[in-house]
Amino acid sequence: MTVPAGAKTLIILRHGKAAPHDAYPTDHARPLIARGHAEAEFIGTHLKVHGPRPDAVVSSPVLRALTTAQIVARNLQAPIRTEPCLTIDTPTRPILALIEKELTGAGCLLIAGHN
C-alpha cells in the first residue's frame, strides 16, 4: 500500500468476541472468549504481514478491548497504552481530540474500543 508523504492512517478496532453480559458482575469485567482471542491474533498477524503497521496502539481500559489491543500490539511489537476516554458511551469530542493529538506523533495509529 502506497501512502502519500505526510498522510496519516487511523485504524479503528472493535474488541473481539466477549463473554455474555449476564455472566459477569459488570460490563467492564467481561473477558474475551476463545473466539475473541483468535480474532485478535488474526488481526495482529494480518497487520504484521500486510500492513498498515501502527506506530502506537491506544486502547479502552475495559477488559475485552484492552485484551484485544494487547494481543494485536504484541504481534506488531507496537507500544500500547490505555486511555480512559475510550470507554463505552463517551461523547465524540474527547475521542476526536485524542486521535488528533496521537496522530501528531504517529504516522499510523490503532485505536481499540467498543461499538
Image: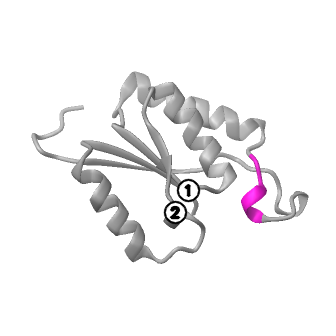
Residue 86: mark in rendering: 2
Q: Nearer the viewer, residue 82 or 23?
A: 82
Q: Is residue 43 above or below residue 6?
A: above
Residue visible at 58% across and 65% down in the picture = 87
Q: What stretch of residues is rendered in magenta?
A: 27-31
Residue 60: mark in rendering: 1
Residue visible at 61% across and 51% down in the picture = 65
Magenta span: predominant SS is helix
Q: Is 29 displayed left or right of 72 in the figure?
A: right
Q: Is 2 displayed left or right of 81 in the figure?
A: left
Q: Is 24 displayed left or right of 37 in the figure?
A: right
Q: Amino acid at mark 2?
A: Leu
Q: Nearer the viewer, residue 92 or 97?
A: 97
Q: Nearer the viewer, residue 114 or 61?
A: 61
Q: Quadrant of residue 1?
A: top left
Label 2 and label 1: CA atoms lie apart by 5 Å
Give the x, y percent position of residue 27: 76, 64
How many C-alpha atoms fall within 10 Å of the one at disc 1: few (<14), some, or many (≥20)? Answer: many
Residue 48: mark in rendering: none
Q: Amino acid at mark 1?
A: Ser
Q: Assess whether mark 1 and mark 2 are in contact (beta carbons under 8 angstroms).
A: yes
Does the magenta-highlighted stretch encompass residue 57?
no
Q: Is residue 45 above or below residue 20?
A: above
